[in-house]
Image (cartoon, rainbow, N blue to C red):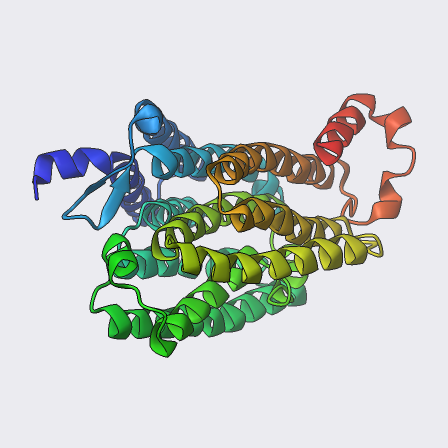
Amino acid sequence: MDTPADLLTFIPGIITAVGGLLVMMMAAFKASERTSFLVTLLVLASAFGSAVPSLFEPLVTSFGGMVLFGGIASFGTAVILFASFFSVMMTDDYLKQSGLLTSELYAMILFATTGMISLATANHLVVLFVGLETMSICLYVMAGFFKNEKKGAEAALKYFLLGAFSTGFLLYGIALLYGATGSMYLDVIATMAEPSLLYLAGGALLLTGFFFKISAVPFHMWTPDVYQGTPTTLTGYMSTASKTAAFISMIIVVMRIFGGENEIARSQEVLQIIAILTMIVGNLVALTQNNVKRMLAYSSIAHAGYLLVGLASGSDQGISAMLYYLFAYSLMNVGAFGVIAYFERNKGLDFTEVENYAGLGARQPMMAALMSVFLFS
């Protein structure tokens, strides 16, 4: 290990982690929410700036092979930070009106972002698990931020229980893969892989854990309730940054662990079936929704199916398409939730109901045009 060089490869995650500690200390010393908001934006912008130069670097490992740097890992980091920055920008005014805004929320967002970066850059199953749990625990808190409302408590409880359930699948899969190969490094697992029952069961359980996190059918049932009960701007954060982290990690795991010819064929069959089910169920159920946030939840489920098509192809072109799709999806989804939050904040109406958008083009032509662009995109 070359510690100074290793630290430089993980500098975006270090910036967000230190920033989270700083904001938490500021909250302890009664700093204003506005100050915490500005510091959070500065931290995320700095982390994004540090991630951009590595986008064009080849994919290499650091920290003794446990962390990935450059290529797809740096791209995922940049998209996560991009989505986090714009989500935070919308959150301040939105939650201030509800009287629920606290400085600790910004610390939670920074810690969750650190976990997402760890997840997206993991080349070791323990690093992957720690990143996933760091992200998930913070998101459980955000889901229940409307703590005085029944829907907020329901969202947090469902997310926590099903999140813990899915983590059990993933952790048991990690244990079986270690038992089959004797290693937790993804590249070593790929070289030691044999089509034994232990290895196949471990791979299947690991994929099941990922399917929960990306809301793929039939592991999607938590998504609409959690999206509906979570504050709108935080829903946008959850649906973009966390989904990007999970997909980037899933791409790395599938292409490394299931990189052999036989393993690719087996994983492709599973991914194709899940992708088809996810696209069909997500779109059909979205058509029946009267609540915009539930509609966008099922839409995000369908988008997970579209993304899985690229992964199911098993080709570099498919992976490249997924990465472009993730960036465009994050930009447009944050925008759509931002428009909903704008109307909830400024009009005092429940703009989560579809019927309240009737005549919006005549009353608010600019915002109606923006919403149309985001939804058509």
In this picture, residue 299 sits left or right of residue 170: right
Q: Quadrant of the C terminus?
A: top right
Q: Quadrant of residue 37?
A: top left
* Residue extending furthest toward the front: 261
| Quadrant position of residue 179 | bottom left
Left or right of residue 350, residue 318 in this image: left
Q: Is residue 303 above or below residue 193?
A: above
How far across and how far down the image is residue 256, in percent?
35, 51
Q: Residue at x 68, y 51 (%)?
A: 302
Q: Position of residue 375 (x, y in %)?
A: 74, 36
* Residue 161 seen in the current view: yes
In-front residue for pair 66/95: 66
Identify the image quadrant of the N terminus.
Answer: top left
Can residue 144 be seen by looking at this rendering? no
Q: Nearer the viewer, residue 377 or 22?
A: 377
Q: Position of residue 14 (x, y in %)?
A: 25, 40
The residue positioned 30% from the left and 33% from the top of the image is 70
Image location of residue 162, percent across then percent down = 53, 71
Q: Which residue does the image show at 74% across and 28% down from the upper left? A: 373
Farthest residue to the bottom: give it. 197
Left or right: where 34 falls relative to 358: left
In the image, residue 89 sits, relative to residue 146, either above or below, namely above
Write the residue at 50% across / 55% down: 142
Residue toward you, 261 or 211: 261
The mark tally for this picture is 0
